[in-house]
Amino acid sequence: MRILHTADWHLGDRLGRIDRTDDLRRAVERVAKHCHEQKADVLLVAGDLFSELARPDGLRDTIRHWQDVFHPFLEGGGTILTLTGNHDNESFCQTLVSAMNLASPTVGRPGEVVPPGRLYLAAEPTFLRLEDRERGFPVQFVLMPYPTPARFLRGEGGLKYGSPDEKNKLLVRAWADELQRIRNHEKYDQSAPAVLGAHVHLHGSNVGPSLFRITEEEDVVVQGADLPRQFDYIALGHIHKPQYLGEPHCRYSGSIERMDLGEQADQKGVVLVELGPDGRNSEPEVLPLPATPIYEVTVREPSEDLPRLRTEYANAKNDLVSLQIRYTAGTDNLEDVLRELDRIFPRWYARDWKETGALGPALSTEPGAPGKGFAETVRDYLGQELIQHDETERDAILRIADDLLKDME
C-alpha cells in the first residue's frame, strides 16, 4: 500500500492583504499530481485542511475544487484520509462529517474495513482499516485530531480546569489515554501494519522561527518517544517545518506552501511511504513541492535603493514581500516611493514606513528656528499615514482631527 502523507493545507488563508487561495490551490493540484505519478493508494492529510480565516463561500468553493482535482484519484479507487487540526473550524468539520455519514450510514464503526474510493474526515479520535487494493492485506489507521477540550475532554469533570497550563496537562493525558484505548481495542491487531495520523506538537520537534498563529503557552505538547516502536509510519501535522523525530518513519511533512515569513527557508514537500503485510517496504521518500518565495525588503535610501531593487527583483511579481521603508520628508516623496514599490512587488503583504525625522528634532536647520508644534506634528503624521486612503475618507479624518486639536488648544 502506497501512502502519500501531507498536512497543513490552510485552504482559504490570507497573508496580510494577500488572498492565498490561488497559491494553495496550485499546491493541492501538485499533491494530486504526485498521487497520480506515484500510483498512491492513500492520501493522508494530517490536519489543518482549512484556514480559520476562510469565509463560508470560500469553504464551499474549496470543496468544489477538491472534487474537481481528486475526482480521478477517487474514481480510480484511491482513498483520502483527513483529520482536523487546530485551525479547522470544529463546528463546520462536525457538520461535514455528519453529512458524509448520512451518505454512508453503515461506515464508521471502530476497527472496520472501510470502502476505498472516498474521502474520510476524522473530527474525533478514529480507528479504521483499509485493504490493499492488489494483495488484500489490511492496514490499520489511527487518526488523532488536534487535542481540544471538545474533542478529548468528555464529561463535566474534564472541563473543569483553573488555568491554561492545567487545561494543557489534562489534554496531554487525555491524548495519551485515547491513543492507548484505541490500541487496546479488540479489533486492533498488534502484529498488523499500522499508521498513526496526528495533528499535534510532539515533544522534541524543531518548531523553527515560530509556531503558526499559536503561542507556546497555548500549544499542547505530547510525549511520543514510544510511537516509532508502536507504528510502522507516523504521519504528523501542525509543525510546518518538515522533519523527522528520532526515526525516519516518524515525520512532519510540513505545510504545502510557505505560510509566513518564518517559513521563508523551508523546502516544502510530501512524503511517500510503502507498506507491505509485514510493515514498511522501504524508508519514506520526500517528494518536493515548489513554494512561493517570501522575504522582507528594507528601503533605507529610496533614491539609491529603488533603481537597484528594480533590477535585482525584476521577476518578483509573484513573490510575497514585507516592506520596511525609511524616507526623508522634503527629499523623498512617500507617495512616489510607495507607488514604485507597488510596481516592483505587487504582492507585498505588509509594509511599514517611517520618516527618519518623525517626532524627532526640529526639521529646520536655521539657528533659532522653532520646531514643529504638537498640532502640526499630528497633522503631518496623519497626512502621511492616510496617503494611500480614499481622498474623501482622508479629508473626513483630518477634519475630525482638526476639531479635536482646536478643542485641546
Image: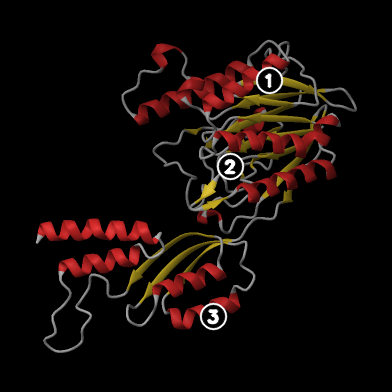
Image coordinates of residue 45 in percent, x first then y, are 67, 35
Of mark 1 and mark 3, the one earlier in the sequence is: 1
Residue 235 appearing in the image: no
Q: What residue is disc 2 on? A: 12
Residue 334 appearing in the image: yes
Q: Secondary structure at mark 2?
A: loop
Residue at (73%, 10%) from the top-left corner? Answer: 106
Choose between 37 and 323: the one closer to the eye: 323
Image coordinates of residue 321 in percent, x first then y, are 53, 62
Is 391 rendered above or below residue 198? Answer: below
User: CA–CA distance between discs 3 and 2?
Assistant: 35 Å
* Colouring scheme, one of rainbow, by chain, secondary structure, one colour: secondary structure
Q: What residue is disc 3 on? A: 308
Choose between 408 and 192: the one closer to the eye: 408
Label 3 sits on what residue type? Arg
Q: What residue is disc 1 on? A: 100
Residue at (48%, 52%) from the top-left corner? Answer: 16
Residue at (55%, 33%) from the top-left corner? Answer: 88
Of mark 3 and mark 2, the one earlier in the sequence is: 2
Is 395 rendered above or below residue 280? Answer: below
Of mark 2 and mark 1, the one earlier in the sequence is: 2
Image coordinates of residue 378 in percent, x first then y, are 22, 65
Q: Are marks 1 and 3 in contact (CB under 8 Å)?
A: no
User: CA–CA distance between discs 2 and 1?
Assistant: 22 Å
Label 2 sits on what residue type? Gly
